[in-house]
């Protein structure tokens, strides 16, 4: 072989050796990658048991227990996996829905009921409106769930730092249809003031009274009254703490 050919061949072999020696640094071993993935929070969530419940929850007590257990999982960062498969969606399509709780809550993006109660498809019948107020359409939705879906628990869920309540307390001009929301919250504000609530506690107290008023609006329904008389439904007020992630019963 001529000298130039030998020279070029040696260079090629040397370059290949250098490249191969650096591969272990450029591409970590598959075993190492697996170990990192196995210890990640994402894998821990994926490995969590799939959330299951009875198809029919017949009593308010059972429903309340499921909600509070789910919130404890959410609060402690231990949510269960959810069955979101095609087969599950098809089952709900064919057999219909059997939600065990109606949740009337604020539209606030920080208060998603399915997450903070750690529930899945078909579990909750949710009515969301700014300020978690009750007007005829919201009440009709509650009545539908209770009468036609036999849902045994109704929850009015308020939360701290509610924007609608804050706007009502602070006053000022409300544009468009926002005033219709604030007008509905106004009685709660007046009650808080009439009890001599301090300025620093006025928003939180108004929020609690607003939940109470929404609950009272629901209890005026003849459909709800009939179900209450038969102990087939319960209506509760709850409050959600944004940073703690905890839901508490307020009545």
Image (cartoon, grey):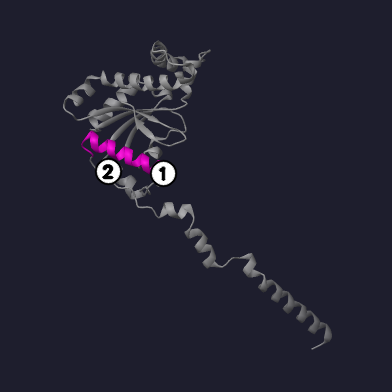
Residue 41 on image: x %, y %: 47, 52
Report if residue 194 is visible in the image: yes
Residue in the picture at 36% in, 41% down? 72
Q: Which residue is mark 2?
A: 94
**Does 69 appear in magenta?**
yes
Q: Which residue is mark 1?
A: 76
Report if residue 122 is visible in the image: no
Q: In the picture provided, is 99 more to the left or to the right than 128?
A: left
Q: In the picture provided, is 182 more to the left or to the right than 229?
A: right
Q: In the picture provided, is 41 more to the left or to the right than 65?
A: right
Lower sequence index among marks 1 and 2: 1
Q: In the picture provided, is 229 more to the left or to the right than 116?
A: left
State the residue in front, 81 or 159.
Answer: 159
Residue 60 on image: x %, y %: 24, 33
Residue 33 on image: x %, y %: 53, 63
For the record, the magenta segment spans 57-76
Residue in the picture at 34% in, 18% down? 213
């Amino acid at each position: 072989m001529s000298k130039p050919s030998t020279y070029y061949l040696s260079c090629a072999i040397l370059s290949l050796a250098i490249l191969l020696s650096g591969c272990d640094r450029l591409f970590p071993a598959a075993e190492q990658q697996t170990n990192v993935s196995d210890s990640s929070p994402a894998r821990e969530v994926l490995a969590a048991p799939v959330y299951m419940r009875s198809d029919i929850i017949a009593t308010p007590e059972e429903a309340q227990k499921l909600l509070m257990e789910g919130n404890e999982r959410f609060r402690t960062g231990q949510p269960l996996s959810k069955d979101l498969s095609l087969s599950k969606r098809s089952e709900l399509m064919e057999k219909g829905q059997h939600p065990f709780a109606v949740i009337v809550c604020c539209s606030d993006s920080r208060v998603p009921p399915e997450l903070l109660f750690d529930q899945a498809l078909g579990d909750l019948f949710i009515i969301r409106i700014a300020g978690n107020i009750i007007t005829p359409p919201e009440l009709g939705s509650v009545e539908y769930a209770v009468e036609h879906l036999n849902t045994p628990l109704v929850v009015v869920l308020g939360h701290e730092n509610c924007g609608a309540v804050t706007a009502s307390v602070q006053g000022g001009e409300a544009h468009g249809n926002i005033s219709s929301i604030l007008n509905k919250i106004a009685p709660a504000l007046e009650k808080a003031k009439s009890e001599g609530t301090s300025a620093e506690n006025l928003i939180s107290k108004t929020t609690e009274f607003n939940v109470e008023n929404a609950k009272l609006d629901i209890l005026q329904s003849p459909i709800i009254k009939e179900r209450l008389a038969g102990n087939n439904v319960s209506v509760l007020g709850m409050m959600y703490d944004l940073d703690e992630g905890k839901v508490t019963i307020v009545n």
